[in-house]
Amino acid sequence: MTDNIETLTRQVARDLDKIAYATGNWSPPRQRDGEPVLDVAIIGAGQGGLATAFALRRLGIHNARIFERAGNGGAGPWTTFARMLTLRTPKHVTGPDLGIPSLTPRAWFEARYGEAAWQNLDKISRHDWQAYLDWFRDTLNLPVTHETALTDVAWDCGLLRLTFMEAGGATHMRWARKLVLATGIDGGGMWHVPSFIRDTLPADRYAHTHQEIDFAALRGKRIGVLGGGASAFDNAATALEAGAATVDLCIRRQTLPRINPYRWMENAGFLGHFHALPDLTRWRFMRHIFDLNQPPPQDTFWRCSRHDGFRFHGDTPWLNASMQDDGVLVATPHGEMAFDFVIIGTGFIIDLARRPETAGFAPNVALWRDRFAAPPGEESAVLGSYPYLGSHSQFLPRDPDAKDAEKLAAIHNFTFSATPSMGLSGASISGMRFGVERLARGLACDLFVTDGERHLESLLAYDAEELTSLTAPPDFAGGLA
């Protein structure tokens, strides 16, 4: 297995060498106060951040660095709070490879397990996906600084001044011309726990699905799960597999959705060009998609339903919760339910003010409700809360004449909150093939245009002679030898 991976790694180097034309660094270096200035700082070393760094390098932007708050191996959800057995995405979907066959998940999987294993595979396991991303990062030697969290973004004479906090509490500053936020599903806000849970229950009696949970401690316990998404079912299944006595999963809808709109979206037309549609059309697309929601995958539902202790309750929203007789008492329209522990799968909310890296400029960012008025009957408070982005995923000012318009234009949102503006992008494997390249080309275009005069000066000063002799040597064969 190791030999096959090493062979594949060498093949990647050969393939990239064959298509290396016009990938050399062309962006002139800069300094501020004696410190080097990054062309692009990328926040997040998950799949979106890694793929963005690779795409920039393919376009000749080498002065970029990724900053990740987690330690090595802890970026993204796959080996932290993700509790599915496999990815939701079909195995044939490509993404970070950017069209390089030897960099695809399939090439890596076949090198590790063999071609027959790929043919027999249904979906890639989350652990294998993380191993693939680690190999991808190491093979391409992508520059990642771990255990470093972005805490503040300021604008200083045409540059971004980024403040980072290291794991030990020390802070340091870096200059950058461009900033990419590739911080995942919750990168536009925060994970959501309803106030009637957060304000009334002790912290040791509930957890959101993204949090660390001691499932072994739930053995023999009565567990309540609020939410009908895939993560809610993943956590319900994990609790049952750990020996929970019962798991009651409750949703507010009458029944679970059956149609997954993401499978429809996996076509080149939508993935490549959704962002160019008129606002009204984009709004109607996203309103329908958000209203449908995603059903849990079939195998995830079966993973729960095969346990005798699993019970599913439709049309059962939770109205409030309290502690009683050393247990959690939950009120529903159909009566009270008693649990020992509850798991909250209510997703996330979009609110840039809740993120330390965006809180400083959040009030000035244009949201969809600021730029678009939905026709009567087509309103959506949820959609209206998402940032309204420019064609390169950049933030736009709420007030077009605002002083910080230039700063916002230098900050590019590659999180899930970009979805209403850009379609599937950084937080989605399905959208990465198109979203990453569109983002990288936008960044490269902005950098080149900004430096247009410097590039012109470079051309005017260019004096490398190609014609050096007017007499052909005796052995010259017209270039055919």
Image: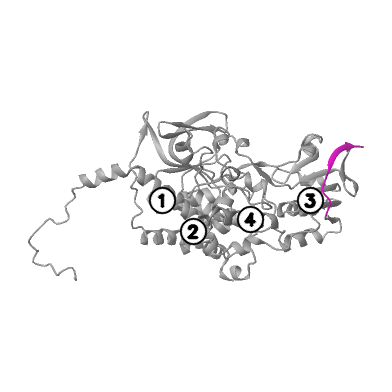
Q: Earlier in the sequence, mark 4 or mark 2?
A: 2
- At 83% from the left edge and 48% from the top edge, which residue is drawn? 223
In the image, 197 versus 406, the foreground residue is 406
- Camera-nearest label, 1 or 4: 1
Q: Earlier in the sequence, mark 1 or mark 4?
A: 1
In the image, 13 versus 152, the foreground residue is 152
Q: Residues within 10 Å of mark 2 (few under 14, many from 20)?
A: some
Q: Which residue is mark 4?
A: 126
User: What label does residue 57 carry, if any?
Assistant: 1
Task: Label 4: state its secondary structure.
Answer: helix
- Residue 51 against residue 206 in the figure, above or below: below
* Residue 253: percent from left, percent from top: 79, 54
Q: Earlier in the sequence, mark 1 or mark 3?
A: 1
**Callout 2 amino acid:** Asp
- Is 322 within the magenta? yes
In the image, is 288 to the left or to the right of 253?
left
* Residue 257: percent from left, percent from top: 74, 60
User: What label does residue 197 carry, if any?
Assistant: none
Q: Which residues are magenta?
A: 315-324
Q: Which residue is mark 3?
A: 239
Report the residue that reaches farthest toward the front.
376
Tell me how far mark 4 sits from mark 2, CA to CA: 18 Å
**Callout 1 amino acid:** Arg
Tell me how far mark 4 sits from mark 3, CA to CA: 18 Å
Tell me how far mark 3 sits from mark 2, CA to CA: 35 Å
